[in-house]
């Protein structure tokens, strides 16, 4: 399981970008720790990498939401 910071670093994004994607529903933390921190799975990381690929290809967030 990854924290939001580790997930962001692994995908070459900022922490705030990951939190923004979560706030608009493109990504969701799969769990919370006992201290209520977001925890992301390998599947969440794969989804974020796919979002990044779509963004790098020039797709809008609305287009990405429709695809996912």
Image: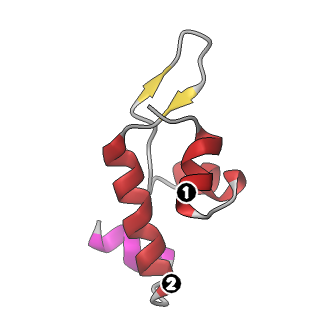
User: What residue is at 57 percent from the left and 35 percent from the top?
Assistant: 3
User: What residue is at 48 percent from the left and 71 percent from the top?
Assistant: 52
User: What residue is at 55 percent from the left and 57 percent from the top?
Assistant: 21
Looking at the rendered image, the quarter that the C terminus falls into is: bottom left
Residue 48 placement, left or right of 9: left
SS at mark 2? helix
Q: Which residues are magenta?
A: 61-67
SS at mark 1? helix
Q: Is residue 1 above or below residue 56?
A: above
For mark 2, what is the residue? 56
Residue 67 appears anywhere in the view: yes
The front one of 35 and 61 is 35
The front one of 26 and 44 is 44
Q: Is residue 64 magenta?
A: yes
Q: Is residue 68 magenta?
A: no
Q: At which x and y percent is residue 1? A: 44, 31
Q: At which x and y percent is residue 41? A: 38, 37
Q: At which x and y percent is residue 46? A: 35, 56
* Disc number lying in front (2 or 1): 2
Residue 23 appears anywhere in the view: no
Q: Is residue 31 above or below residue 11?
A: above
Q: Are marks 2 and 1 in contact (CB under 8 Å)?
A: no
């Amino acid at each position: 399981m990854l924290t939001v910071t580790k997930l962001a670093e692994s995908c070459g994004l900022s922490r705030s970008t990951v939190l923004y994607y979560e706030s608009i529903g493109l990504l969701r933390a799969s769990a919370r720790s006992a201290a209520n921190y977001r925890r992301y799975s390998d599947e969440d990381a794969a989804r974020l990498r796919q979002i990044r690929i779509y963004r790098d290809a020039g797709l809008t967030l609305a287009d990405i939401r429709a695809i996912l």
